Every structure is written in C-alpha cells, then in structure tokens.
Image: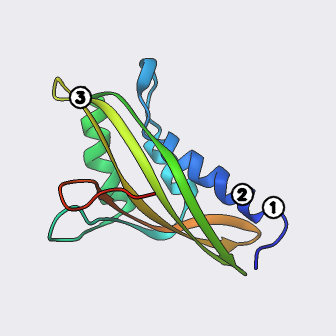
Amino acid sequence: MSGEGDKESIDAVTKAFFGVFSNRDGGCPNLSALYELFVPGGLILKTCGDAVTVYSLPEFIEPRARLFSEGGLREFSEEESAERTDVFGSVAQRFCSYRKSGVLDGERFEAKGMKCLQFVKSSGRWLLSSVAWDDERDGNLVSM
C-alpha cells in the first residue's frame, strides 16, 4: 500500500536517473547526481549475457564519465517507455522497459531493454537502492 505522493516521488527519481546520462544537443551528463539518487552503498547490476557484473556507484560512474568526456559516446539519451511500480510501506520496486540511442565510437546505435529499480524511503525521501538491467537481444525480447 502506498502513501500520498509516493508514486509521483518514485516517478521523479526514475526520470532523474534516466536523465543523468543524456548528452544530446550538447548537454553534459551529470553522473555525480547518481550519489543524490541512491542510498549510500547502492548497487548497479548489468545482466546482459551470461555473467552478472555488480558495480558500486564509483565503479559504475568512472568508466562512463571517461566515455562521455573523451567523446566516445555522443548524442546519447535513454528513456523509460513503460513501467509497473509496486509500493509497500518504505520499499518499492519498478519494472520498466527503456530505449536508448546515441553514437558510440562513431557508430549510431539504438537499443531497448528492461530495468528493475528498487527503492527505499528514508527520512521521507525515496532513494534508489539498486538498479539491474538487461538489453534486448535474440531470444530476449522486450514485451512491456
């Protein structure tokens, strides 16, 4: 059962999370904003393929900051396309589809996938505790 405004607050944190990575139209990604969106010790998990890669926030941010600052990833944006959010007290989970596009090392790309975002409410504020994602590929299609 959710409280007044919980879903709207979770929507706002989710939108901010996806927006952190955009560098379209000359924008500059603000990867350090992730520290404001996550609880201390928050995790990001990449599950694309056979092995799971678990990142602390610094481990996740550092290579992406380099990719953006050195120009390897340009005109990038990622956005949520559909979602389902469940809230119970001070915990919430959001399962969502997303799409992303950009230019990586001179090659234009488009992709989509699914993310699972877990939230906790701390001192009246919703924060991410973890994000796991998997990209669409043969045999693993987005159905949301």
Residue at position x 40%, y 43% in the image: 99
Amino acid carrying label 3: it is Glu
Answer whether labels 1 and 2 touch (C-beta < 8 Å).
yes
Disc 3, SS: loop
Mark on residue 38? Answer: none
Distance CA(mark 1)–CA(mark 3): 40 Å
Residue at position x 22%, y 71% in the image: 52
Residue at position x 55%, y 58% in the image: 83
Q: Tell me where residue 69 appears, x and y as whole percent.
A: 30, 30
Distance CA(mark 2)–CA(mark 3): 34 Å
Position of residue 72 relative to residue 125, above or below, is above
Mark on residue 9? Answer: 2
Mark on residue 5? Answer: 1
* Sequence-first disc among 2 and 3: 2
Mark on residue 70? Answer: 3
Distance CA(mark 1)–CA(mark 2): 6 Å
Position of residue 8 relative to residue 131, above or below, is above
Disc 1, SS: loop
